[in-house]
Image (cartoon, helix red, strand yellow):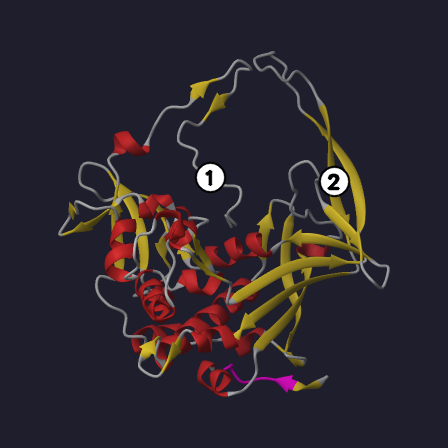
């Protein structure tokens, strides 16, 4: 253990080193002195516990995809998806509909596939509030990325990757931070920021509940259900920032310049700081607060992540407009679900691809 780090991290200094990555480890604990917490549940397997090489039980509280989602929630104001004041001027993409073409449906900060979502690629970009006659995906492929459309063999040539980096940075730099996949274009970028949340020395706590339906107006009756929580000797969030990947986004006059790389790194650090700065409710029964922080082995505190992100935005040279609006006619976007034989419903517009990391 080295001396305690007290000064804020500098994206410029970090990029100037030869270090390939930056590792931050935060220890967390349930608020209000609670001893139990609720990990993420996964289909068919519930909470995941495994034996580590040192034989202690480890519970996956949140995986990398879930943590990416949590880190994006610090960028917006609650349910209306508007940017927090500190990120004023950050580029992102909106899917809009409605008669005036201003009704926001989702944004690239809320969509799991980010800029690569069909909400954006299959809609039409608005210019002067009028939709273009091509899909936004076609605009990206031909005009921005400059790729040849070879069907399922489409991919960037080596020199075209600079266009890929600068285009994604222009429309949605958040997609560079958390990684992005355009399957039809042969473009896949790994995460700059990878985060996981694990509990060590974990033990399962089995509890139960009951649902009462006194008037008999539902089909569920009065079921008693099982509910699992966990205890642990330590809850640890690990954030790994791939500094070498950020450096690779530009070289000389190609790709991102130094100010833009500093923004990508600073934005990643800002997100971590915001997530850790106050108690964060990952789920209903998983309300955690920071109890300790190490940065590359140095004892630190959250003040080291006090990044002036507004200054970085101003130095990044983002193009106008900062917010790109993609339009869908509401009759194409909103379709009623079809009833199924078991009384449930099936969404007729579900295009999720399980082979894609939808975070």
Picture quarter containing residue 227? top right
Residue in the image at 24% along x and 54% along y: 139
**Where residue 180 sits in the image (x, y, percent)?**
45, 57
Residue in the image at 37% along x and 50% along y: 81
* Residue bearing the label numbered 1: 352
The stretch of residues the image draws in magenta is 4-9
Query: Of 167 and 86, which appears nearest the observer?
Result: 167
Q: What element carries label 1?
A: loop
The answer to if 225 sits in the magenta stretch is no
Q: Residues within 10 Å of mark 1 (few under 14, many from 20)?
A: few
Whether residue 17 sits left or right of residue 309 in the image: it is: right
The N terminus appears in which quarter of the rendering?
Answer: bottom right
The answer to if 5 sits in the magenta stretch is yes
Report the Cα–Cα distance between label 1 and label 2.
28 Å
Q: Residues within 10 Å of mark 2 (few under 14, many from 20)?
A: some
Query: Of 30 and 219, which appears nearest the observer?
Result: 219
Residue in the image at 67% along x and 24% along y: 211
Residue in the image at 35% along x and 73% along y: 310
> Is residue 5 something that shows in the picture?
yes
**Where residue 104 sits in the image (x, y, percent)?**
30, 44
> Is residue 109 something that shows in the picture?
no
Label 1 vs 2, first from the N-terminus = 2
Residue 7 position (above or below residue 302): below
* Residue bearing the label numbered 2: 228
The circle drawn on residue 185 is none
């Amino acid at each position: 253990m080295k001396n305690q780090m007290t000064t804020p991290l500098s994206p410029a200094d970090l990029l100037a080193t030869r270090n390939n990555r930056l590792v931050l480890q935060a220890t967390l604990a349930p608020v209000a002195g609670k001893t139990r917490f609720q990990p993420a549940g996964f289909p068919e397997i519930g909470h995941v516990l495994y034996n580590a090489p040192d034989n202690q039980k480890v519970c996956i509280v949140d995986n990398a995809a879930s943590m990416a989602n949590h880190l994006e929630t610090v960028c917006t104001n609650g349910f209306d998806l508007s940017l927090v004041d500190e990120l004023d001027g950050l580029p992102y993409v909106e899917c809009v509909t409605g008669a005036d073409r201003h009704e926001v449906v989702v944004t690239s900060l809320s969509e799991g596939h980010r800029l690569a979502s069909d909400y954006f690629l299959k809609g039409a970009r608005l210019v002067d509030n009028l939709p273009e006659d091509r899909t936004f995906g076609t605009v990206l492929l031909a005009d921005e990325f400059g790729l040849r459309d070879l069907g399922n063999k489409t991919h960037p040539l080596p020199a075209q990757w600079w266009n890929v980096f600068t285009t994604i940075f222009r429309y949605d730099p958040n997609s560079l931070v958390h990684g992005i996949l355009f399957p039809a274009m042969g473009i896949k970028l790994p995460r700059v920021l990878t985060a996981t949340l694990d509990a060590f020395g974990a033990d399962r706590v089995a509890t139960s509940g009951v649902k009462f339906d006194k008037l008999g107006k539902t089909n569920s009756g009065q079921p008693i259900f099982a509910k699992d929580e966990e205890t642990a000797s330590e809850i640890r969030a690990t954030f790994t920032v791939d500094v070498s990947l950020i450096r690779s986004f530009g070289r000389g006059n190609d790709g991102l310049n130094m100010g833009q790389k500093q923004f990508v790194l600073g934005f990643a650090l800002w997100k971590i700081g915001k997530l850790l700065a106050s108690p964060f409710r990952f789920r209903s029964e998983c309300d955690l607060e920071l109890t300790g922080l190490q940065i590359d082995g140095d004892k630190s505190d959250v003040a080291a992540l006090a990044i002036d992100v507004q200054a970085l935005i101003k130095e990044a040279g983002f193009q106008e407009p900062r917010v790109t609006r993609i339009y869908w006619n509401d009759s194409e976007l909103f379709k009623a679900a079809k009833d199924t034989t078991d009384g449930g419903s099936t969404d007729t517009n579900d295009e999720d691809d399980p082979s894609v990391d939808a975070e």
